């Protein structure tokens, strides 16, 4: 999730921010953390520096920092191959463990990481991002994708930004939610999908709307990749990089305007196969719903039959 101007912009420290001057040089990202915000973490912040990445971490997360440094080169290479863009910058990664403080920063309990493209900064809530079904590697890949896209593209729709980042990171988003898949499937059946134009600049902030927006973004980009090939995605991104508007970039890359592509995608979600997938994904919920429906139907029929018998008794009293 790239941090936007209307979202919280930094870490809040509680009892002061203790630095070890000999351990690292202050980067612009660190200066951003130090002087643009109020302190929130009490422990010492250390750093692991190499030519590729600068990792800032709480002392207790030293192993995590070395792990990130170890897989960063392969993550970078995979993204460059997938998107066709070169990582010509040295990002800063801040790894924290205070879940409550992290939630206070982002303002949403579902988010486990975010990116600040203007500062080439990634902030990861390690306590949650390292738990199943997440992995720190996939989270880093997702957030680095945001930095890479914003490095080369000035204007990118929010749905495309999040959709591409999920696409290249194997479908992983920065969200923790127990019902991520069912939101999209139910919305596609009930007619509750959010239009792509409504997801152009921002996402809803309530849990249902936010999760659905992420799932729609992922599904739409996956559909484009499946229908038009991987080049369909990279051609859109290249056109955006060359200064084309999102609408023109999509038309140039796919040969159709966005509304037409969106209609195709919506139809693909309404097939019998999609319906069966929805039923299979939540079979117990479907059984419970049908059982409840039958119970209500039976009760209504019972009440109607009882009322009919009472009416007949009023008309023909005493008749057995």
Image (cartoon, grey):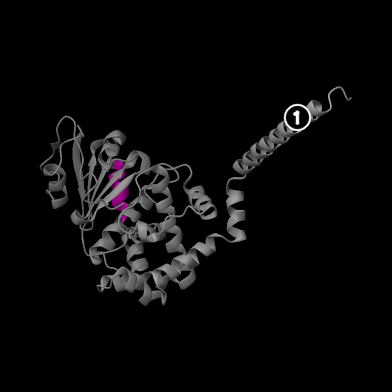
Q: Position of residue 51 (x, y in %)?
A: 20, 58
Label 1: how many residues lie within 10 Å, few (<14), some (14-19) or many (20+)? few
Main SS, magenta region, reads: helix
Q: Is residue 166 above or below residue 262?
A: above
**Is residue 172 in view from this perspective?**
no
Disc 1 is placed on an element classified as: helix
Asked if residue 13 is among those painted magenta in the image, a careful observer would answer no
Q: Which residues are magenta?
A: 63-73
Which quarter of the rendered picture does the C terminus lie within?
top right
Residue drawn where x is 33% and y is 73% of the image: 249
Quadrant position of residue 277: bottom right
| Quarter location, residue 315 | top right
Q: Position of residue 45 (x, y in %)?
A: 19, 39
Question: Can I make out residue 127 in this image?
Answer: yes
Residue assigned mark 1: 306
| Residue at the (65%, 39%) spot, across then down | 293
Which residue reaches farthest right?
Answer: 320
Residue drawn at 46 percent across, 55 percent down: 193
Kindly give the residue lying farthest to the front in the view shown.
Answer: 315
Measured from the top left, where is residue 240 in percent x and y? Answer: 29, 70
Query: How far from the left and from the top, in percent, is residue 135?
Result: 40, 47
Q: Is residue 165 left or right of residue 16?
A: right
Please tell me how many numbered marks the rendered image carries: 1
Residue 287's place in the image compared with 160, above or below, is above
| Left or right of 251 on screen, residue 33 | left
Instruction: Work out whether residue 190 or residue 28 is closer to the camera in this orientation and state it.
Output: 190
Using the image, determine if residue 16 lies above or below residue 163.
above
Q: Quadrant of residue 154?
A: bottom left
Q: Is residue 228 left or right of residue 248?
A: right
């Amino acid at each position: 999730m790239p941090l936007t101007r209307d979202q919280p912009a930094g870490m809040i420290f509680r009892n002061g921010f203790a630095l070890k001057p000999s351990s690292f040089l202050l980067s612009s990202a660190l200066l951003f953390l130090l002087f643009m915000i109020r302190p929130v973490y009490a422990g010492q912040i250390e750093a692991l520096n190499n030519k590729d990445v600068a990792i800032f971490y709480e002392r207790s997360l030293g192993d995590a920092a070395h792990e990130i440094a170890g897989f960063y080169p392969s993550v970078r290479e995979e993204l460059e191959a997938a998107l066709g863009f070169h990582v010509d910058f040295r990002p800063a990664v801040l790894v924290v463990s205070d879940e409550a403080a992290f939630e206070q920063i982002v303002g949403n309990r579902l988010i486990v990481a975010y990116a600040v493209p203007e500062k080439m900064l990634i902030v990861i809530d390690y306590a949650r991002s390292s738990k199943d079904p997440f992995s720190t590697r996939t989270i880093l890949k997702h957030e680095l994708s945001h930095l890479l896209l914003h490095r080369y593209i000035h204007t990118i729709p929010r749905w495309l930004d999040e959709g591409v980042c999920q696409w290249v990171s194997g479908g992983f988003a920065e969200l923790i939610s127990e019902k991520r898949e069912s939101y999209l499937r139910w919305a596609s059946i009930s007619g509750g999908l959010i239009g792509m134009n409504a997801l152009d600049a921002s996402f809803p902030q309530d849990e249902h709307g936010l999760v659905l927006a992420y799932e729609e973004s992922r599904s739409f980009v996956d559909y484009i990749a499946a229908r038009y090939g991987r080049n369909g995605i990279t051609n859109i991104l290249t056109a955006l990089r060359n200064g084309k508007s999102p609408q023109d970039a999509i038309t140039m890359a796919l040969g159709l305007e966005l509304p037409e592509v969106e209609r195709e995608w919506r139809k693909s979600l309404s097939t019998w196969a999609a319906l069966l997938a929805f039923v299979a994904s939540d079979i117990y919920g479907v059984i419970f719903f049908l059982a409840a429906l039958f119970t209500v139907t039976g009760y209504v029929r019972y009440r109607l039959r009882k009322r009919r018998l009472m009416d007949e008794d009023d008309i023909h009293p005493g008749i057995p």
